[in-house]
Image: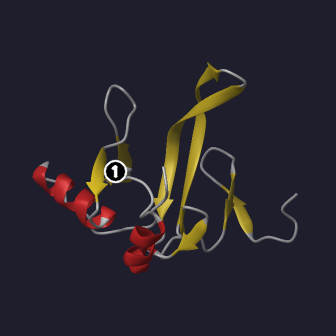
């Protein structure tokens, strides 16, 4: 399936594409029935960030995190939120509810809002790799 793409097996055997901003490997945690849909919830078992800029998607368009103003303007029609996946010493940080830190950005810059909220928790943000519409 990936014959034309440069990839390698990840720590848990999943295909990991070369030269990506970040990758995750997940195991199945839960399946939640939601009407005519089923939501699969994965538990992140491995993660790596390359330091490259990632790509975000908001309101039908892609953007680079360095162009946060574009993300703000593309999301002007709705509420903007910020969420974080946190890593420390090569391990992902989570809580007992398996939820991600999430904040309402209001009309402000979601990256700055998230950084400010995390700093209040005593955490610093030094690598952004993706912003997306949730």
For the rendered model, the colour scheme is secondary structure
Task: Give the quadrant of residue 7.
Answer: bottom right
Side (left or right) of 49 relative to 108: right
Please tell me whether mark 1 sits on a helix, a strand or a loop: strand
User: Residue furthest toward the bottom?
Assistant: 67
Residue 100 x, y percent position in the rendering:
36, 41
- Count the numbered circles shown: 1
Q: Is residue 66 above or below residue 96?
A: below
Q: Check disc 1 and report the residue beneath it.
A: 86
Front in this rendered view, residue 10 or 117 = 117
- Towards the viewer: 130 or 7: 130
x and y percentages locating residue 27 in the rendered image: 60, 34
64 left or right of 69 in image: right
- Mark 1: give few (<14), some (14-19) or many (20+) Cα within 10 Å: some
Residue drawn 52% across the image and 74% down it: 63
Nearer the observer, 91 or 112: 112
The quadrant of the rendering that contains the N terminus is: bottom right
Q: Quadrant of residue 32?
A: top right
Residue 22, above or below 134: below
Picture residue at 86% right of the left edge, 71% below the top: 4
- Where's residue 118, x and y in %? 20, 53
Would you say 8 lies left or right of 65 here? right
Residue located 26% across and 65% down the image: 108
User: x, y percentage for residue 35?
Assistant: 67, 21
């Amino acid at each position: 399936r990936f014959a034309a793409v440069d990839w390698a097996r990840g720590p848990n055997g999943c295909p990991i594409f070369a030269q990506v901003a970040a990758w995750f490997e997940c195991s199945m945690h839960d399946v939640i029935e939601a009407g005519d849909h089923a939501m699969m919830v994965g538990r992140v078992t491995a993660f790596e960030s390359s330091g490259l800029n990632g790509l975000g998607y908001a309101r039908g368009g892609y953007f680079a995190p360095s162009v946060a103003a574009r993300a703000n303007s593309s999301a002007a029609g709705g509420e903007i939120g910020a969420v974080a996946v946190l890593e420390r010493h090569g391990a992902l940080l989570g809580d007992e509810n398996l939820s991600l830190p999430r904040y309402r950005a209001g009309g402000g810059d979601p990256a700055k809002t998230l950084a400010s909220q995390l700093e209040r928790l005593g955490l610093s943000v030094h690598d952004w790799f993706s912003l997306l519409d949730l």
